[in-house]
Image (cartoon, grey):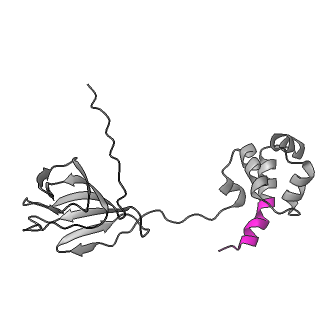
């Protein structure tokens, strides 16, 4: 892993190569950016330390992302490799990495699970989307049957339970906000 000093030292040669590749002179670049020719020359030779105030207009002039000018390291593999969590026979696949805030899970409910759902309450707000199968949502005095494509959104301080009443597995996408963060479901009107 390159140090910050190594990254900064590589900016000048990268700027020079980019300018030459584009066939631009220092005078043309100075006119396009408002940065003096001498400052640009010292920046390219390493005699001037790159700053955000200098790099932003250069990135605009060259029409490249700032990351490309500084040779920022890649941010890493964006793929998630969830480790299943099994509670009371129900599988939860975490789809978010950071603790706190909004959490996303894929939930897999085996057939007839739980057999006798018990309503619970806790802080937070929940949104669920049925991917496959049927899901029974007990929410306060409501007893709802949700099918694929249906969404429910509720305050988890209300007594609630989720169950699979069928003989085949049910899958759902579940988003949970621990501090009562509301999720907003927006649907487009059906095309006629």
Q: Position of residue 35 (x, y in %)?
A: 85, 48
User: Toward which corner of the image does residue 66 lie, by quadrant?
Assistant: bottom right
Quick check: 18 left or right of 110?
right
Above or below, 19 against 90 in this view is: above
Magenta residues (range): 1-12
Q: Quadrant of the N terminus?
A: bottom right
| Horizontal side, residue 45 vs residue 148: left or right | right
Residue 2 shown in magenta: yes
Relative to residue 170, is residue 20 depicted above or below?
Answer: above
Q: Residue at x 17, y 73 (%)?
A: 89
Residue ID at (88%, 46%):
26
| Residue 122 painted magenta | no
Which of the two residues, 132 or 147, is positioned nearer the viewer here? Answer: 147
Q: Is residue 163 left or right of residue 23?
A: left
Magenta region, main secondary structure: helix
Q: Residue furthest right?
A: 38
Tell which of 169 and 52 is nearer to you. Answer: 52
Q: Position of residue 137 (x, y in %)?
A: 15, 57
The residue lying toward the viewer, choosing from 137 and 30, is 137
């Amino acid at each position: 892993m390159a140090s910050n000093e190594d990254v900064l030292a590589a900016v000048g040669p990268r700027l020079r190569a980019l300018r030459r590749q584009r066939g631009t002179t220092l005078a043309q670049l100075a006119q396009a950016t408002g940065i003096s020719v001498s400052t640009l020359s010292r920046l390219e030779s390493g005699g001037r330390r790159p700053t955000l105030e200098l790099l932003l207009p250069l990135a605009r002039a060259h029409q490249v992302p700032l990351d490309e000018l500084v040779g920022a390291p890649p941010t890493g593999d964006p793929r998630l490799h969830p480790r299943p969590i099994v509670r009371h026979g129900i599988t939860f696949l975490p789809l978010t990495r950071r603790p706190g805030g909004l959490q996303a899970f894929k939930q897999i409910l085996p057939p007839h699970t739980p057999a006798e759902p018990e309503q619970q309450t806790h802080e937070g707000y929940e949104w669920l989307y049925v991917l496959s199968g049927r899901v029974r949502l007990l929410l306060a005095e409501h007893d709802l049957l949700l099918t694929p494509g249906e969404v429910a959104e509720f305050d988890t301080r209300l007594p609630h339970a989720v169950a699979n009443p069928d003989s085949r597995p049910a899958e759902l996408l579940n988003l949970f906000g621990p501090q009562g963060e509301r999720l907003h479901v927006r649907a487009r009107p059906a095309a006629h």
